Amino acid sequence: MSEIVKTVCGILEGFIFVFGCYIVIYGHLTPGGGFAGGVILAAVFILIMLAFGKERILKITPRRRGALIESIGALSFLSIAWAGLYIRGIFFRNFITTNPDNHFNILSGGTIPLYNIAIALKVMAGLFLVFFVLSITRVILEGDKLKMVKK
Amino acid sequence: MTETMILSLLTLMILGSIIALESKDLLSSVIAVGAVGFMLSVIFLILRAPDIAIVQVVIEILTLIILIRVTISRDIHIIGDTREFLPFAMNLVLLLVFFIIAADAIRTMPEFGTGASKVALPYLSRGLTDTGAANIVTSVILDYRAYDTLGEATILFAAITGAITILRRKAKND
């Protein structure tokens, strides 16, 4: 990509990342939540990949780290749910008590911000992995059959 | 006022879909699909659902990026005209039947804003004191109905794992 695109993307990617984290963490107070914030965070890495080429992304070994982060997100979602079962006796029970003078604060909501962060990790790693694998693989016509090769 | 806006946006969406179907250039039809998605997110905002509008905008942008990338890297940019008459006519007849039945069903639905189910009223009145979260939508999907969110996360995980597994194979001559 040209120099203008690379410079602008290099400046913008930090701001978009912070905005994505804001949508995830304030998901229990303002519209948004884990899914929307996770997609925005995945879009940051897709932006890096589109602007700087895939060599820049291949340096961070996206397959292994993406699978690791996605598994961490899914397992922490399940472990918080299981902790609700273990502490209070009901699966997915909100076991962190909230007192009423703490409403509209960022630390209100009990386990809901933790769920949001887990889902955001999962969605971010998953969607970026799908885009990465889609753009690395190419289908070529070899002989009589279609074959998938890595570019 | 909001009804006229929604109706005009719906008409534009139908026009955009027809353009996406009938255009010969692949890139034009992809952009028309993107325009339909953005107008849908504006309709969600008018119907007072900002969570869904945010998700719709970002997913539409991701879909557009993937579609444009696929369209440009292919060799063909123009598709030919291969429409037959009999399936097209049957499509129109079935669409007319569906429209008549759906119009009759929508006429008997309750007003916009009154809940159709009786479960929504306790969620709205006790959501803040039960969960502590100010966003009632988040408190429903992550506290009252968190099991459904577990199902949604599982579907996402399985779909992504399947996609990566299929696209993982290397060429034999590598």
Image (cartoon, grey):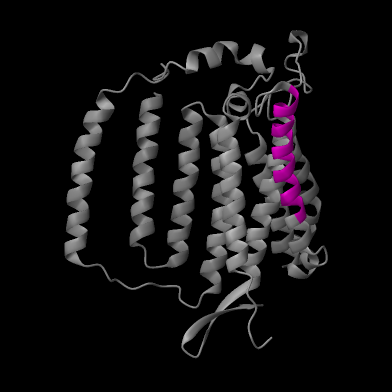
> Which quadrant of the view contains residue A64?
bottom right
Q: Is residue A60 magenta?
A: no
- The reply to whether residue A101 is in sight is yes
Tell me which residue sits at (42%, 18%) in the image: B113
Horizontally, residue A10 falls left or right of residue A135, namely right
Horizontally, residue B87 falls left or right of residue A148, namely left
Residue B119 or B99: which is nearer the viewer?
B119
Across and down, in percent, residue A119 comes to 68, 41
Tell me which residue sits at (16%, 63%) in the image: B86
Residue B100 or A10: which is nearer the viewer?
B100
> Which quadrant of the view contains residue B57?
top right
Tell me which residue sits at (70%, 35%) in the image: A116
* Highlighted range, magenta: A68-87
Prevailing SS of the magenta stretch:
helix
Total number of numbered discs in the rendering: 0
Residue B132 or A136: which is nearer the viewer?
B132
Q: Does the magenta stretch include residue A71?
A: yes
Most extreme residue toward the right is: A59
Across and down, in percent, residue A86 comes to 74, 28
Most extreme residue toward the top is: A101
Does A45 appear above or below A118? below
Looking at the rendered image, the quarter that the C terminus of chain B falls into is bottom right
Looking at the rendered image, the quarter that the N terminus of chain B falls into is top left
Tell me which residue sits at (82%, 62%) in the image: A60
Across and down, in percent, residue B11 comes to 34, 41
Does B30 appear above or below A88? below
- The reply to whether residue A23 is in sight is no
